[in-house]
Structure formats: structure tokens, C-alpha cells
């Protein structure tokens, strides 16, 4: 898609939200919905992405716009579905599954993951079932309900970065800790990569796998920035 606009600006709307304008016209989402952004910081970041485009518009270079569009076109219209999808990760949470060997890998998983399971149990007042090997495990119904309630308590604008963090790490426990500021993006990602890091130490680096991990780390950092922009903590 070619760039056909010249000027990019931010305007405040009634109700305290903000919009980005292209040549004076309010920007809309890909789904043609009004893009009403909750903070001036986020609006400025989205505007900067549009302003930085060259003759051809590259949607993949506009991470903040992507998150904002996801909230507008997916999260808000289908909130119950999105909440259920995110909460579903709690039923098979990565850090509730330990390897059945080698012993040093298991020890590493135990030392790094146990504090976060215990934090979740205390915060949600639930018990978590932990399995070893490939045996399937189902969390108690009250635990699943608590996970659902925790996700349902997250506002629409925060559900988008929570979804990213949870799906990348494979852990709702780590995703919630990330959203609550107990973990930063790289800390949460590294905790989800205990097995992969162990394999790299044993067998060396695989370039394709490392490129994939670098992409996932970048997505986590983008989710962290978006979270900061909607809370007003990042400029």
C-alpha cells in the first residue's frame, strides 16, 4: 500500500480519548472502526509509526498500531472469547510441567519455576497440580475458575499484551506476572525458555531457532512497550 497522506497529528476527543489523524482525517482500524486511543502517549507512538513510513506502508513496522487495531477489532467486539482463549492457557501452563530428566534440567525447572507457581497459588488462593514427563494434567475446577476470573478482571487494552505474553511463554502464570509488573518482558521470556537454554548449553546454538527466539523476544518487548504506553508510564 502506497503512502498517500502528508501530515500526521494527534487530536483529543470528547470523553478523554485520543485519535491519530492523517491529513486531518481520523485514522480508523483495519476493520473500519474508529481508533479511540486511551492515552496521549499511545496516540503519539502510533502517530510516530505512521509518520515514519516511506513511500510504501509496511504494517509490520507498526507494532503499536497493530496492538491498538487488535484491541479495537478483536478484543472489544469479542471480549468473552478472548478472555476464554487466554484463560485456557492456565489449564496446561508451561511451568506446571516438569521434565522427567535429566536431573540437572529438572532441578533448573524446579528452582526457576516454583517461586512463580507459589506466587500464583497465594495470589489466587488456589492449588496447582504439577506433572512430570508427558503425562497430561488437569487443574482443579476452582483453579481454572480463578484463572478465568483473573483474566476477566483485565481491561480490554491490557488484554492484547497479556495475550501476546501468555501465548509466547505458554504460561498464564508468567503472563499475569508480566502484566502485574512482577516480571519484565525478557524475564518472563527467559523463564519460558529454560528447556531451550539447556539444550543450547548441551548441543550448541541453532541459527534458525535463535532467529525465531529473537523474533519472540522482540514481540515481548513490543507488548511491554504497549503496556507502558496505555498506563502512561512510557513516552
Image: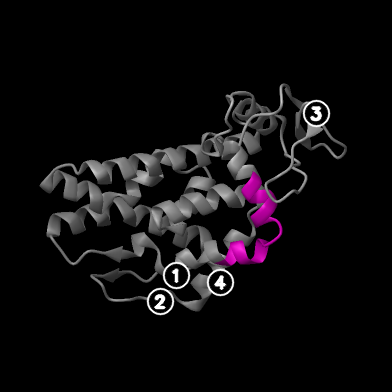
Real-space CA distance between mark 2 and mark 4, rounded to the nearest whole angstrom: 13 Å
Q: Earlier in the sequence, mark 4 or mark 3?
A: 3
Residue at numbered disc 3? 11
Q: Are marks 2 and 1 in contact (CB under 8 Å)?
A: yes
> Nearer the observer, disc 1 or disc 3?
3
How many numbered circles does the render carry?
4
Residue at numbered disc 1? 91
Real-space CA distance between mark 3 and mark 2, rounded to the nearest whole angstrom: 49 Å
Q: Secondary structure at mark 3?
A: strand
Looking at the image, which residue is at 33% across and 44% down?
213
Residue 141 numbered tag: none
Real-space CA distance between mark 4 and mark 1, rounded to the nearest whole angstrom: 10 Å
Reply yes or no: does residue 74 show up in magenta.
yes
Residue 145 numbered tag: 4
Residue lying farthest right? 14
- Label 3 neighbour load within 10 Å: few <14, some 14-19, many 20+: some
Residue at numbered disc 2? 138
Please provide the residue range marked out in magenta. 69-84
Q: Position of residue 51 (x, y in %)?
A: 64, 24
Q: Secondary structure at mark 2?
A: loop
Real-space CA distance between mark 2 and mark 1, rounded to the nearest whole angstrom: 6 Å
Real-space CA distance between mark 4 and mark 3, rounded to the nearest whole angstrom: 41 Å
Closer-to-camera residue (126/77): 77
Q: Is residue 140 visible?
A: yes
Q: Is residue 107 left or right of residue 187?
A: left
Q: Earlier in the sequence, mark 1 or mark 3?
A: 3
Looking at the image, which residue is at 74% across and 24% down?
9
Amino acid at each position: 500500500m502506497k503512502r498517500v497522506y502528508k501530515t500526521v497529528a494527534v487530536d483529543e476527543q470528547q470523553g478523554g480519548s485520543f485519535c491519530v489523524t492523517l491529513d486531518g482525517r481520523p485514522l480508523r482500524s483495519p476493520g473500519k472502526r474508529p481508533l479511540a486511543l486511551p492515552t496521549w502517549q499511545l496516540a503519539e507512538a502510533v502517530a510516530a509509526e505512521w509518520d515514519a513510513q516511506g513511500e510504501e506502508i509496511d504494517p509490520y513496522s507498526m507494532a503499536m498500531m497493530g496492538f491498538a487495531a487488535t484491541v479495537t477489532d478483536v478484543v472489544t467486539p469479542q471480549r468473552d472469547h478472548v478472555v476464554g482463549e487466554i484463560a485456557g492457557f492456565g489449564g496446561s501452563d508451561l511451568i506446571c510441567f516438569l521434565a522427567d530428566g535429566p536431573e540437572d534440567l529438572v532441578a533448573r525447572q524446579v528452582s526457576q519455576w516454583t517461586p512463580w507457581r507459589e506466587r500464583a497459588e497465594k495470589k489466587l488462593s488456589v492449588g496447582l497440580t504439577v506433572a512430570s514427563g508427558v503425562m497430561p494434567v488437569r487443574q482443579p475446577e476452582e483453579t481454572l475458575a480463578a484463572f478465568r476470573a483473573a483474566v476477566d478482571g483485565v481491561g480490554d487494552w491490557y488484554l492484547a499484551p497479556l495475550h501476546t505474553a501468555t501465548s509466547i511463554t505458554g504460561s498464564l502464570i508468567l503472563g499475569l506476572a508480566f502484566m502485574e509488573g512482577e516480571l519484565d518482558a525478557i524475564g518472563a521470556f527467559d523463564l519460558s525458555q529454560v528447556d531451550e537454554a539447556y539444550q543450547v548449553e548441551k548441543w550448541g546454538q541453532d541459527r534458525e531457532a535463535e532467529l525465531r527466539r529473537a523474533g519472540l523476544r522482540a514481540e515481548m518487548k513490543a507488548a511491554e512497550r504497549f503496556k507502558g504506553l496505555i498506563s502512561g508510564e512510557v513516552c
